[in-house]
């Protein structure tokens, strides 16, 4: 595996399985992933195409701010993270149950 492919394999951290992401996958062929904070749209597109052997139509990324939480008597904050919405071209699909 080349260095570039090794780097792309680390861009995607986890798929996000929620009610909202399941509806987006069924209606719009759009899948949601947690990605590295410094990942670009092009890196996310190449990583999804490499790992799942599909063709990507578009990618939208957004930064999610960490919530302030109280831990016992002190205040703390969860980490910020980045989320990517990946739309696949017609005829392509990702099956997480088989992976």
Image: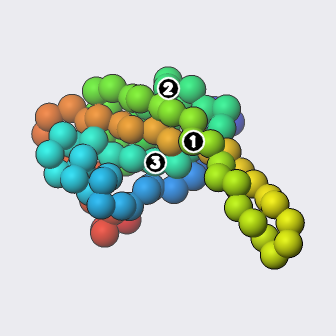
Residue that badge 1 annotates = 64
Q: Closer to the N terminus: mark 1 or mark 2?
A: 2
Left/right of residue 69 with respect to residue 81 in the rendered view? right
Q: Nearer the viewer, mark 1 or mark 3?
A: 1
Estimate how packed mark 3 is, as few (under 14), some (14 to 19) or many (20 or more) residues with alpha carbons within 10 Å.
many
- How far is mark 1 from mark 2, CA to CA? 16 Å
- The reply to whether the C-beta atoms of the residues labelled 1 and 2 are less than 8 Å apart is no
Residue shown at 57% from the left, 26% from the top: 40
Residue 65 placed where, x, y %? 62, 42
- How far is mark 2 from mark 3, CA to CA? 12 Å
Residue that badge 3 annotates = 33
Quadrant location of residue 58?
Answer: top left
- How far is mark 1 from mark 3, CA to CA? 12 Å
Q: Residue furthest right?
A: 74
Residue that badge 2 annotates = 41
Q: Could you tell me which quadrant the C terminus lies in?
A: bottom left
Which is nearer the eye, 22 or 91?
22
Q: Which mark is residue 94?
A: none
58 up-or-down from 63: above or below: above
Residue 22 placed where, x, y %? 26, 57
């Amino acid at each position: 595996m080349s260095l570039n492919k090794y780097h792309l394999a680390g861009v995607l951290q986890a798929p996000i399985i929620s009610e909202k992401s399941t509806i987006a996958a069924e209606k719009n062929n759009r899948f949601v992933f947690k990605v590295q904070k410094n990942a670009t749209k092009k890196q996310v597109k190449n990583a999804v195409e490499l790992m799942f052997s599909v063709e990507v139509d578009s990618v939208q990324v957004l930064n999610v701010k960490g919530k302030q939480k109280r831990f016992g008597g002190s205040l703390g904050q969860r980490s910020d993270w980045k989320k990517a919405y990946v739309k696949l071209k017609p005829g392509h699909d990702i099956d997480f149950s088989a992976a």
